[in-house]
């Protein structure tokens, strides 16, 4: 039996290892899908099933229309290879995701909302936000493209892991990603490999652990291969390792965020004085220990509301589940953190 703060820390570490094992057991392998059709309606339905409910219009020779689509679902990323056989126009919109697209041959344009028209080529991928209403008016007849949908919440979480701190604002991405060389070319080739693995019987992506690691690598790779508002921070020297006291508290809170923590209990977990812990968190995390507790709880609530069907639960139930008692204060913090009310997140498709 373990007693005292050290015993609690060892117990927490053991629980964390158990949580990781259970997460791997619950993980799923990659899911592959392929479609070929000469029907515009069937092409629309296939794209909508994996990407967006879009307006799809044949702009070139209708007799040449022949859609070929291959897709692999990696969890927070959807990677696809698409070809239409003729000139196309399309428009779509969906919040909560980013999109990266690059043609293997041919070209296409993208306009976000009322912004300028940007052109993708075989050397320059386009990074855009479908939440801003996307128009594609010049998809060439010979265009075949890699198209990757990325969940924003997962990308933000990965950015926070790389930086080792909380990020208050989602990064703003430049529209172009150089895929002719360096990290951009590596990222595209890695994404393409996931599609090629569908033709390998009993391939590696059939293993949940490999799928999960590849998903994480693609998220990290996108952050390192694109230009965005946190790019310089990612390129900065790696900060000094956090003190053991800080790590003990972070591990305990990540494992059991709904526990009724207070400053004294966190200091006991850290095995240091409260003043020492507060100073260590300020220096190495950029917030107080209790602010970190609230941040982790908000992230858990946000993630659960995003994947819960409306009508099956309430905001209050989810908030209470993750340790929030004062709903008014919770709602205010939630809106400040995510830019929308928790009920809006729950109602979103």
Image (cartoon, rainbow, N blue to C red):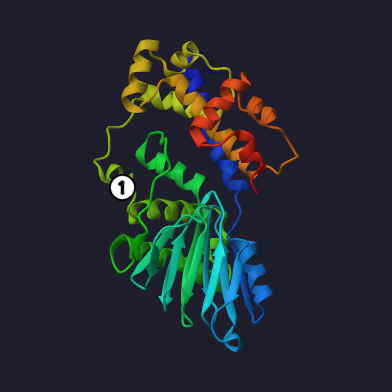
- Residue at the right extreme? 311
| Residue 100 can be seen, yes or no | no
Q: Residue at x 40, y 11 (%)?
A: 274
Q: Position of residue 191 (x, y in %)?
A: 45, 64
Task: Determine whether the residue tagged by mark 1 lies in a helix, strand or loop.
Answer: helix
Front position in the image: 145 or 159: 145
Q: How many marks?
A: 1
- Residue at the left extreme? 237
Q: Residue at x 46, y 22 (%)?
A: 291
Q: Residue at x 50, y 19 (%)?
A: 7
Please tell me in which quadrant of the rendered image residue 341 appears. Answer: top right
Front position in the image: 57 or 299: 57
Q: Which residue in the protein does label 1 denote?
A: 231
Q: Position of residue 320 (x, y in %)?
A: 65, 25
The relative height of residue 349 versus residue 52 in the rendered view (above or below) is: above
Q: Position of residue 109 (x, y in %)?
A: 43, 69
Q: Residue at x 43, y 43 (%)?
A: 170
- Residue at the front extreme? 114
Quadrant location, the N terminus: top right
Q: Position of residue 88 (x, y in %)?
A: 53, 76
The relative height of residue 119 versus residue 18 in the rendered view (above or below) is: below
The relative height of residue 92 versus residue 237 in the rendered view (above or below) is: below
| Residue 290 can be seen, yes or no | yes
Please tell me how crowded label 1 is: few (under 14), some (14-19), or many (20+) other residues with Cα within 10 Å: some
Horizontal side of residue 57 vs 13, given as left or right: right
């Amino acid at each position: 039996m373990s007693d005292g703060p050290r015993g609690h820390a060892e117990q927490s570490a053991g629980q964390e290892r158990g949580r990781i094992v259970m997460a791997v057991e619950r993980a799923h392998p990659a899911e592959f899908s392929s479609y070929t059709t000469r029907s515009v309606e069937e092409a629309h339905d296939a794209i909508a099933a994996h990407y967006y409910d879009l307006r799809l219009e044949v702009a070139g020779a209708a007799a040449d229309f022949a859609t070929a689509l291959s897709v692999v679902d990696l969890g927070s990323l959807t990677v696809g290879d698409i070809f239409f056989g003729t000139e196309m126009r399309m428009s779509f919109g969906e919040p909560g995701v980013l999109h990266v697209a690059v043609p293997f041959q041919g070209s296409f344009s993208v306009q976000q909302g009322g912004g300028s028209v940007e052109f993708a080529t075989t050397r320059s991928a386009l990074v855009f936000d479908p939440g801003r209403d996307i128009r594609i008016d010049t998809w060439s007849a010979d265009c075949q493209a890699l198209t990757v949908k990325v969940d924003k919440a997962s990308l933000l979480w990965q950015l926070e892991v790389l930086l080792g701190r909380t990020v208050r604002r989602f990064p703003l991405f430049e529209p172009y990603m150089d895929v002719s060389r360096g990290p951009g070319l590596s990222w595209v080739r890695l994404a393409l490999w996931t599609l090629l693995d569908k033709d390998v019987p009993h391939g590696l992506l059939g293993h949940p652990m490999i799928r999960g690691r590849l998903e994480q690598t693609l998220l990290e790779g996108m952050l390192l291969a694109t230009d965005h508002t946190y790019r310089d921070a990612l390129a900065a020297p790696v900060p000094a390792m956090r003190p053991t006291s800080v790590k003990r508290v972070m591990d305990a809170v990540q494992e059991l965020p709904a526990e009724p923590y207070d400053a004294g209990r966190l200091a006991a977990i850290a095995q240091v004085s409260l003043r020492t812990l507060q100073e260590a968190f300020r220096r190495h995390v950029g917030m107080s220990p209790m602010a970190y507790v609230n941040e982790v709880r908000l992230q858990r609530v946000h993630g659960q509301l995003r994947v819960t069907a409306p009508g099956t639960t309430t905001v209050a139930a989810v908030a209470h589940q993750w340790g929030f008692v004062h709903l008014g204060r919770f709602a205010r913090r939630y809106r400040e953190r995510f830019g929308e009310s928790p009920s809006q997140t729950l109602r979103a498709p």
